[in-house]
Amino acid sequence: MRFFRLAWLAVFLSALQPSLFAQSAEPWRPVTPQDLSMTAVKESPGAPAVRLYYSYFKDDNAGFVSEYIQIKILTQAGLKYADAEIPLDPRDSIKELKARTIHPDGTIIDFTGKPFEKTIVKGHGIKYLAKTLTLPNVTVGSIVEYSYVKIWYRARVSLVSEWQLQGDLFTVKERFRFRPFLGAVSVPLEWDRFDRKSQSLCSYSNQAGAPTPRKSKDGLMEVELDYVSTFDSEEYMPPQSDYKPTVMCYYGGRESSSPEQFWTAWQERISKFDEEWIGKDSAFREAAEQAIGGETDPVKKLRKLYARAQQIRNLSFERERTANEEKKEKLKPNESAHDVLQHGYGTHWEIDALFVGLARAAGFDASMIGTSDRYERSFKRMILWIGQFDKAAALVTVNGKDLVLDPGTRFCPFGTLDWRHSSAPAWSFKPGGVFLTTPDGQDSLSKRTAKLELADDGSAKGEITLEFHGQEAFLRRLDGLDTDEAGKRKLLEDEVLAWFPSGSQVKLLDSQGWESTDDPLVARLHVDAPLYASMAGKRLVAPIDFFPTPFKTVFNPSSRSYPMVFSFPFAETDEITLQMPDGYSLEEAPSPRKAGLPGIGAYEISSSLLGNKLTTNRSFHFDQVSFPPEKYSILRNFFKVVQGGDGTQVVVRADQANAGAQ
């Protein structure tokens, strides 16, 4: 049953037949005189490089993926493609890796070094590695190529295989091949049948005139494309997978005959499993009564149950343990929600399931749901893949209103979700459950205060206080889980250091609220910025606001093709006090700026002078997260005011007596 819970979210299915095919890297392609002499491609003017050839072959019989990449470097900017990066699971291995550089005169220089390992993503027990290598002696005009075979650490087949047909380079020729497993695949919805049945299917997403995959007698499916244009992404667009032409191949059983049958069959199976795993236990009622105490208000009762669930040790947000460490800690697997309560630890899903059990024991209508990740991809009903719902949450009805709650995510406040799972499609697993949309993201408030002293040499030093609420605090706490106190210090210091000119120094004085769920995260830092103001004769020119402007570059283009999607609504309130040096006075007070878009956001910045201290107050809130392209122009005009106000500089001038002394 534990494996079943992983299987529907997850990720891998077990094959029932040994491998039939051997793996081998593709041989080098002949390089033509035209390839060697190429200096540009008319289909992609100004491109830094062009992909002459790309080949991808995934074989679920032999358990490998092979890739072959051949790139022509056209400009200095294209030299970055001399660095190759091969992502892999830490348990996988790379075989038959070969790479070489071909100069325009046909000289070939083979890569003879060893690739090194690099962690590219690490968090909450999940780690992704990459084998990286730098190809030798690459210059403008060179061709770089490399190929490899990636061997899986154990026999398995992926629930879904995905080919994205467009990339960031124009491609002259590309070839995709997929050989599905030829034997029976243990499909979860067929596990309890004697006449097990499995099949592989392929479908297009965002089809752009691409041909239907050819299928040979041994099951091999193949697509070849010529002259494939680049995919031109934009900042803050919806997931690129919503727009990129993609071929998806996946495995299924009888339920795959139609989308309606697929989602209905899975909903019934998951609902049954959830009900059995959560169960009904007298221990739930006792634990719920202890948590609630004498509270009678339904929402407050639910908050207390939520807090009780979050007291459970959350294994999903701890580093991955070795088998010896698990044995030493004597961590037993949880086979039910009762076990989670008794053991005092559990995974993200298990803690959410326990919370549902506690809520039911207290008389609430509660059930599990699956949520999608709007950062990664939008849910598409026609794609028969339950991995589109990759995270669990709880649905609870209180006072006639449905609340989506997630105590299984560390530091997630009551009544909110990680922004990636807010305003996103979800799937109810209660009997007869339906698809729904999770609530909008919780507003996020940042309060920032700075008191700086400006010196006559243009340097500034002082203290900054940061106070984060909502998602801003939540996300920083999650980042802090992956490190120790020194690492948390560095996270905050690096964030503030990026606001100041090169050569500045930032030191954290103190911080609090890292382990809280509802309290703000507060930090005090000292900053020393030698180049804060620029010197112009007898004047010093300094910014009145050094805090970063949100979405600073997204509104630079004059037009836009794709919708804009931001992470979550937010509000910022800033107060910056700049004390001018002795013998200097303000030349001209900065003009206030103000702008607003009804129902969307508002901005205001103004300054006041008291003695030799200039105090700037700034307020900014942005209340929506999704906008169609036709709204771009009004948003662009609004952010011009924001950028103009935030970019205002103040000029202070040496007084006459002081100027004469200079």
Image (cartoon, grey):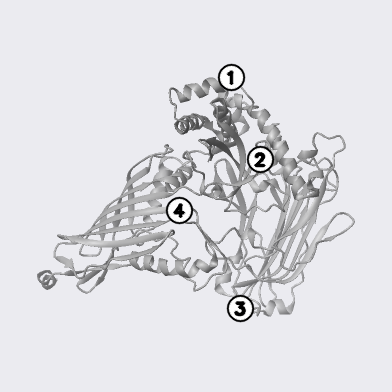
Quarter of image, res 390: top right
Return the residue at label 2: 433
The residue tagged with tag 1: helix, strand or loop? helix
Is residue 182 something one can see in this rendering?
A: yes
Residue 29 on image: x %, y %: 76, 68
- Image disc number at residue 45: 3
The residue tagged with tag 4: helix, strand or loop? loop
Residue 70 on image: x %, y %: 69, 67
- Disc 1 vs disc 2: Cβ atoms closer than 8 Å? no
Is residue 97 something one can see in this rendering?
A: no
Instruction: Characterize the local packing of mark 4: few (<14), some (14-19) or many (20 or more) Cα atoms within 10 angstroms.
Output: many
Between label 2 and label 4, give the one nearer the viewer: 2
User: Could you tell whether 535 is left or right of 611 in the image?
Assistant: right
Amino acid at the residue labelled 1: Ser
- Disc 3 vs disc 1: Cβ atoms closer than 8 Å? no
Q: Upstream in the sequence, badge 4 or badge 1? A: 1
